[in-house]
Image: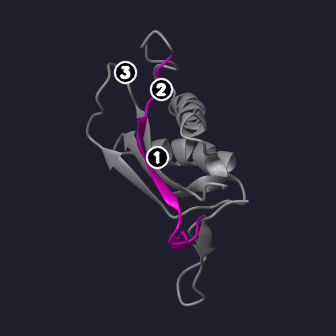
Amino acid sequence: MTAVTLIRSAQLSDLAQYAYAATAPKDARLIFLAGACPLDPDGSTVAVGDYAGQAAACIENLETALAAAGAALTDVISTRVLVASDRQPDLGAAWAVVRDAFGEHDVPSTLMGVTVLGYDHQLVEIEAVAAVVDEG
């Protein structure tokens, strides 16, 4: 069971495909993840030129990092999705993949177009914070 509580407000637009806020209980362990990048294990950028493909690779790498920290996507409390583009359709292509991956766990998120990202041919990066309550 996730420690994260998603918060919605009837006073805010329901156009956004995510909760506007989230909380974790005071005994939660917070996990701050580095930006998940579309890199394969040898460090090569995957899905060159493909926003959706890179977003999918970022989600896979995010899930791997979460698992290493004892968490899963349902423990994520917020995300920031960075897309190297000034075109809304490119941002939308990346966002659709992220949104689908999180499903009903629609955490507060920020989608941003940026000038450039850190790796050659990189188009997408996903930052996240998670919260878990350890058993015991």
Measure how far apart labels 3 and 1 are at the Cα level.
16 Å
Q: CA distance from mark 1 to mark 2?
A: 15 Å
Q: Are marks 3 and 2 in contact (CB under 8 Å)?
A: no
Which residue lies at the image location 55% right of the left edge and 71% below the top edge? 25
Q: What label sits on residue 51 in the rendered view?
A: none
Q: Nearer the viewer, mark 3 or mark 2?
A: 2
**Disc 3 to disc 2, C-alpha distance:** 10 Å
Q: Earlier in the sequence, mark 3 or mark 2?
A: 2
Dot 3 or dot 1, earlier in sequence: 1
Front residue (pair 62, 70): 70
The answer to whether the residue labelled 1 contacts the one labelled 2, judged by CB atoms less than 8 Å apart, is: no
Helix or strand or loop: what does disc 2 sit on? loop
Q: What's under tag 2, amino acid-wise?
A: Pro
**The magenta stretch spans which residues?**
18-40
Residue 33's quadrant in the figure? top left
Q: Secondary structure at mark 3?
A: loop
Q: Look at the numbered disc 1 and give the secondary structure of its residue.
A: helix
Q: Amino acid at mark 3?
A: His
Where does the C terminus fall, quadrant-wise?
A: bottom right
Image-based side of 73 in relation to 42, left or right: right
Residue linked to disc 1 = 91
- Residue 87 position (above or below residue 116): below
Disc 1 residue crowd, few under 14, some 14–19, many 20+, Cα 10 Å = many
Q: Is residue 92 visible?
A: yes
Which residue is the site of mark 2?
38
Give the x, y percent position of residue 63.
60, 37
Identify the residue at image location x=58%, y=70%.
19
User: Which residue is disc 3 drawn over?
Assistant: 121
Which amino acid, mark 1? Leu
Residue 131 falls in image quadrant: bottom right
Q: Position of residue 38 (x, y in %)?
A: 48, 26
